[in-house]
Amino acid sequence: HIRNYRIPTFIQSLKFDTNNRTYGPFGFEQGQFFRSQVDGRRIIGFHGNCGAYLDSIGAHFGPISHAFPFEVVGPFGGDYGTNIWDDGKHTDVREIVVGFDSTINFISVLYDKHGRPVGPFTHGTNGGGKTYRIKLDYPSEYLTSISGYIGEVSGLTILRSLTIHTNEKCYIPFGTAEGRYFSFPYTGGKIVGFHGSCDSTHLGSIGAYYEPIPHTHPSKVFGPFGGDSGDPWDDGRYIDIKRIVVRYDGSFIHSIAFDYVDDNGSIRSIRHGRIGTRGRIKIDDVDEYLTSISAYFHLGGITSLTFQTNKKTIGPIGEEKGWHFSSPATGGKIVGFFGRSDKHLEAIGAYFEPISHLYPVKSIGPFGGLGGHAWYDGKFNGVIEVQVMHDDVIRHIMFVYDKSGEEVRSNRHGGHDKDARITRVRLDYPREYLTSISGYKRDDGNKNINNAIIQSLTFHSNRRRIGPFGKETGNYFWYPATGSKIIGFYGTCGKTLNSIGVYAEPIPHLYPFKTVGAFGGSGGTPWDDGVHTDVRGFYVIASNIIHSIRIAYDNS
């Protein structure tokens, strides 16, 4: 927390979160709240300003060396509880029931064990409050995190609020979102079990067991490219590659050596081939990694090598003559090499692994209340049209999405009022796309914000502001533009729209280039087909040279 209501401004309170627990708070939790967090990264240093007090603090973030550095997190909450419980590890989670009023009264979890339901395991008791059942779309939907608030009630530190996060959506806060915030760290894995403490009336604390998601981190193998001579070698897969040393003369690549980083963070150096003039490639930045390799091969061996990282091109090393080859763009990073060598480097191939943070689809929200029934449109290529029925509140919303060139109309989310107005807005898709939403929510008339409804909605595109619809009063919410585009919506509704959340993904043309080339000679008549939605096919006439190319494009 920052004390900013008088001069000077300084840090009033600090709390540190690790992958296993929370330390603090230290100081008094008053003033303006702040939080520094980058998913999938760890803090490797601090910076700030200080005098008589700590005036400001910031953090440097670096990658987590191990993709799945831990299996157990928490528990988060109080240290008390007459019942310490531990459900152990299972294959997956199928269903969660949460009982709550102003605090979390109980949690009940139905697990999966190799295709069979196990449980439910119930902790705490139903004290007559509300219950909310979350039935996951098993096995495609899985739990990724839990967040919430910890507070004191009658002198006891307990869980006051819980929010359930899956790979597809976020189930809005149950209980009262007041007190000290906590969040399970992002691991890139899925939750397969819970543990914690409780008494007869409250859930005191909660923690989780994580496991990797096998299908999200498959390794791909490309190559080897080159000749069939020489002895085969295979370095296998590692966490990272920090240095490459290439030895060559005017005709061939004689040898290649790698400095790999293994699971323990140790450097392992491996060399293949003979001596020659040396060219060294260093990958210095903590967030730099190899993304592809290209080369030339002539009878007798590889003549040239070029390496591409996510930040620069290194090479060519050697003489570019012979047949060209390159590894395809996989959206991943190279984690190992294999090939053949003798007097020269004869062939080379690479192991790729996806980079989980590269193009993530994020679920944000939902914003609003707990009332109504859940709706879920899913994820598409983009949003083409928005329809809103509104008066002083949002009665219903509908969307038209793009699914690989085909228009898909969603169901109506909410009710109907003959006196309300319907507004339809069609975007100039695909050039125009939604980037953000904002609005206002209000309580249900009984001053219960948990049963809030959406009072007003505004959509923001890369070109304009669409709205506002409804009456701009109540509690403001906002999902800011983050360099992403909205590709789907979800939420809850009844007679009106109760809540809304978004699915967003990075905009492809921002990562990492807009125009490349042209490669080849400077003769001939220039041609430029322009920019289209996609490429559907092409036709090439060739002999020992390329005579012509014809391309079929898609335009929306």
Image (cartoon, helix red, strand yellow):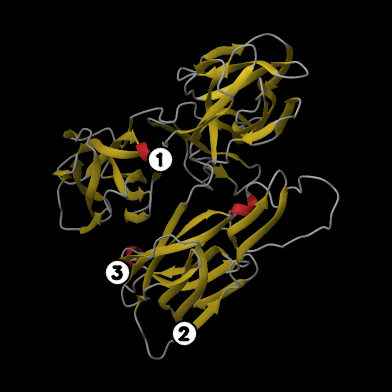
- What's the distance in space between the residues labelled 1 and 2, CA to CA? 42 Å
Location of residue 321 in the rendering, given as x and y in whole percent from the top left corner: 74, 29
N-terminal of the two: label 2 or label 3?
3
Q: Nearer the viewer, mark 1 or mark 2?
A: 1
Residue in view at x 53 percent, y 19 percent: 261
Q: Nearer the viewer, residue 32 or 461?
A: 461
Residue closest to the far bottom: 419
Residue picked out by circle 2: 422
Q: Residue furthest right?
A: 523
Camera sees residue 50? no
Q: Residue furthest front?
A: 543
Q: Quick check: marks 1 and 2 in contact, CB under 8 Å?
A: no
Q: Amino acid at mark 1?
A: Thr
Q: Out of 206 and 338, give the one closest to the viewer.
A: 338
Q: In the drawing, does residue 317 fall left or right of residue 417?
A: right
Residue tagged 3: 372
Q: Amino acid at mark 2?
A: Ile
Q: Secondary structure at mark 2?
A: strand
Type of amino acid at the residue the image marks with label 3? Gly
Q: Quadrant of residue 21?
A: top left
Task: Name the disc covering residue 216, or none.
Answer: 1
Q: Secondary structure at mark 3?
A: loop
Q: Position of residue 116 (x, y in %)?
A: 15, 43
Give the residue at x 50% y 61%: 381
